[in-house]
Image: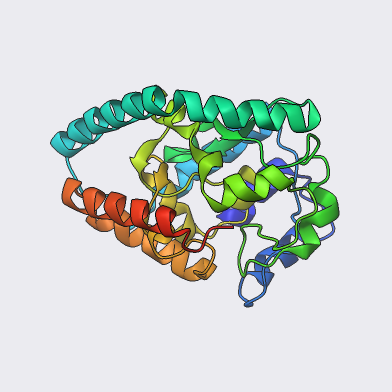
Amino acid sequence: MQVNILNAIVDKDFNGKARKMLESKKAKEGIKEYPILSFGETDIEKLRMGIVETLKHSKIKPAGGKLYEAVKRAFDITVSASAIIVLALPVSCFALAIYLNDGGNPLFVQVRLTKEGKPFKMYKLRSMCIDAEKKFAEVQKANKCDGLAFKSEDDPRITKIGKFIRKTSIDELPQFINVLKGDMSIIGPRPPLPREVVLYTPEQMDRLLVKGGLACTCQTEGRSNMSFDEWMHTDIEYIKNRSMALDMKILIKMIIAVLKRKGAE
């Protein structure tokens, strides 16, 4: 099904590069060149439709009923609203520092996908240079991740301030706005990028059965130290076993991991 999704977005007669990218997922090394970097609104809609169709055949049933969903949403609203109020001043200070550093917008907005492939604009404090997205094509071959996600220990696009706010996870704080809006939850699989999802297997697509979140198990175990396959597996296990008790456990472990800067990059 993932090849069909790819073909719906790009020319069906492309030279096979995309298929080779799919095959490379079977190896331990990560993707070195993404077949699609730029997604327009039409492309995103085609991708979403492909995701919805794929999920119809999923063998995974998310745990938790309507009561769980209601309590989870109430919890998300309470925590995110409180966090926005408490963190408004420190986040503003970091935003000002980022602006003074290069004069660019301190807020980085990026399209991510959540439940059933629904696109939304995810917010972050900008940790990279102003034209980082345009320069991605230049650095993608330096990928150190063993799967579809991108990670580079020496990404030249990261600013000095960016290194600090990434290490401390401060760059993620604006996402409490996404949680309050309902785009995300506090706990849930991290929302992926379209360029990653277009290469997902049907099994990996199961991550999109539920709303994306600020953190899930991979963050508590050291998000930069976990292999891509382990990351996918822990997300699926969360979806199959989620409950408010599990959410609270992950939240506590996430706070400890952030304070210890465990696996952060």
- The image quadrant where one finds the C terminus is bottom right
Q: Foreground: 143 or 85?
A: 85
Q: Height in image: 224 above or below 138?
A: below
| Residue 210 left/right relative to 51 | left
Q: Residue at x 27, y 57 (%)?
A: 240
Q: Foreground: 50 or 97?
A: 97
| Residue 66 left/right relative to 229 | left
Residue 226: percent from left, percent from top: 49, 69
Q: Residue at x 62, y 70 (%)?
A: 146
- The image quadrant where one finds the N terminus is bottom right
Residue 260: percent from left, percent from top: 43, 60
> In this figure, what is the number of numbered marks?
0
Instruction: Using the rendered view, name the quadrant where residue 17 is placed.
Output: bottom right
| Residue 146 left/right relative to 71 | right
Q: Residue at x 56, y 38 (%)?
A: 112
Instruction: Using the rendered view, name the quadrant where residue 186 is placed.
Output: top left
